Image (tube, coloured by chain):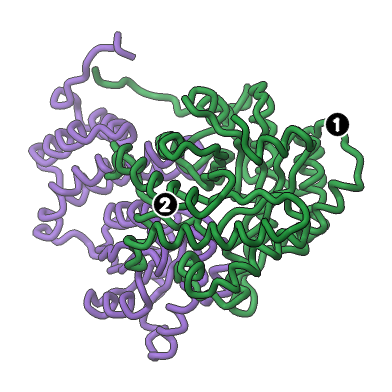
Amino acid sequence: MSEEEDIILSELPDDELVPQMQDDLYDGLDEEVVEGVNILLERGWMPYDVLTKALVGGMTVVGNDFRDGILFVPEVLMAAKAMKAGMAILKPLLADTGAPRMGKMVIGTVKGDIHDIGQNLVTMMMEGAGFEVMNIGINNSAEEYIAALEEFDADILGMSALLTTTMPYMKTVIEELAAQGKRDKYIVMVGGAPLNEEFGTAIGADSYCRDAAVAVEVAKDLISQR
Amino acid sequence: MSNALSRMLETREWLLADGATGTNLFNMGLSSGDAPELWNVDEPANIKKLYSGAVNAGSDLFLTNTFGGNASRLKLHNAENRVRELNIAGAEIGREVADACDREIIVAGSVGPTGEIMEPMGTLSFDGAVEMFHEQAEALKDGGVDVLWVETISAPEEFKAAAKAFAMADMPWCGTMSFDTAGRTMMGVTSADMAALVEKLDNPPVAYGANCGVGASDLLRTALGFVASGTERPLIAKGNAGIPKYHDGHIHYDGTPELMADYACLARDCGVAIIGGCCGTMPEHLSSMREALETRPKGDRPTLEEITAKLGGFSSASDGTGDDVAPTRTRRRRRG
């Protein structure tokens, strides 16, 4: 591709710049994504439109290609990094300009599970879709999840596990919520490589999400049903 | 290099490896989220029972209860300073069980992934990974394992780091990756990629292959991918006993002993030398696999159609190898 001409982002009209930014996001080019975000803002775009039309649009393609086995984790991590760079500019502006609030989520991997790639992707995609997310990292006990839900005044609990040895702990957390009479306060979403729909249902989660793109769709649906 | 595993492979067409560790330990009362490795010291009788379960069911080789025994994983349980102790204990119990058996049994020291993402995407450096694997390798060696066995790896760099650490420990080794994402590892490695990677190592493994992943069908498609590379090296297949389901408070795998027997024979017919199970594979599955391998005659190498007819469909249409590559996205211009 090296023989192709360089593209000057600032010379592109909006309708070419947005798809180009989506491509740059797809390719994990964080500097170009930041440049694109700044150009659109200078042209008077609302921060929320920059987010949804350019960044989320690009991440949706990434999510779909990940789901379809075209992209794998390394490429998705690079794209997420570029997304994060763009979000860093938009985040304070979004708060100031009264962008629509989608809901609040607490997410973390369960006790004993260190694998947080999946939940980091979900965090990125959820933030991209306008949710506020408190990512409490790895190795969380039921008590830690519940404390975070209350502190953050969350609507959604997201739990992630990569190991078949740790996934049953999701049930423990849901049972603890129920025991404290708090189960109905929260939407519980679960995900991770070894899980499936049937498992999600069996442990009493509201939804199993096979990937980050699905998680966003499900969260929107469940929030709107509340 | 002369070692117990290589010698056994020279005299046998196939070896039966072991099955699940976690699934068996949960049935003995391990709580979800707790570190199984702590039981090497706290509940040694259960670990002995775990190993004996495989040996009594006919396994020629079993893996030690040390999968999460690296500093990065043990840190979750505030046990990162107990790597040496827990690995030696897990290996010594293994040695004891193997030496008490009237057949020769290979003790393989299990080494699982660090759980960290390696540079440049993540924070773990290559040298950092080597250091962690080396610490564990030396302890397993001192505990008396015959061979080191890195498993469930998805990143090529992490596989290379383990290989380097095992060379530093001067131990023979085996290595398997988990092909759980559209026929590739999470990091996008195909069976062909792994076959090429293995041959480029300075200290290639005694045997290599695939473990865990999605189901028995996918695992054998991966095995056929290794075979297609023309490798002369012994291959390993350790597939899950079906798909995890949740029943009455614990995880149950839906693969029957009969299915795993079919899988074992198909694996042998594919050209796999070391055949075992992974998650959900209990002693009754292993017995059934052993009996089938001993009584059913070796068949021709199965086609993909024959595999799916017996074991069920694949999780994805393609596994990214051969002419059957996944669709690539049509690109617009790229800068620079």
Quadrant of residue A133 within the rendered picture: bottom left
The residue drawn where x is 38% and y is 90% is A180
Would you place residue B217 above or below residue B233 in this image?
Answer: below
Query: How far from the left and from the top, in percent, is residue A76?
Result: 37, 41
Quarter of the rendering occupied by the N terminus of chain A: top left
Are both tags, 1 and 2, on one chain?
Answer: no
Task: Name the amino acid, label 1.
Answer: Asp
Chain B rendering hue: green
Q: Are marks 1 and 2 in contact (CB under 8 Å)?
A: no
Q: Circle 2 sits in a helix, a strand or a loop, which is it?
A: helix
The chain that hosts pointer 2 is A
Task: Name the amino acid, label 2.
Answer: Ala
Q: In this view of the protein, can residue B79 be seen by the observer?
A: yes
The residue drawn where x is 26% and y is 58% is A130
Crowdedness near tag 2: few (<14), some (14–19) or many (≥20) residues, C-alpha within 10 Å? many
Choose between B218 and A100: the one closer to the eye: B218
Q: In this view of the protein, can residue A216 be seen by the observer?
A: no
Would you place residue B119 above or below residue A136 in this image?
Answer: above
Query: How far from the left and from the top, in percent, is residue A146?
Result: 32, 79
Would you place residue A142 above or below residue A133 in this image?
Answer: below
Crowdedness near tag 1: few (<14), some (14–19) or many (≥20) residues, C-alpha within 10 Å? few
Q: Is residue B244 left or right of residue B139?
A: right
Q: According to the image, label 1 marks what residue?
A: B300
Q: Is residue B314 left or right of residue B127?
A: right
Q: According to the image, label 2 marks what residue?
A: A213
Choose between B113 and B220: the one closer to the eye: B113
Query: How far from the left and from the top, in percent, is residue A195?
Result: 54, 61
Quadrant of residue A50 within the rendered picture: top left
Q: How many marks?
A: 2
Choose between B7 and A19: the one closer to the eye: B7
Task: Give the number of the mark in front: 1 or 2.
Answer: 1
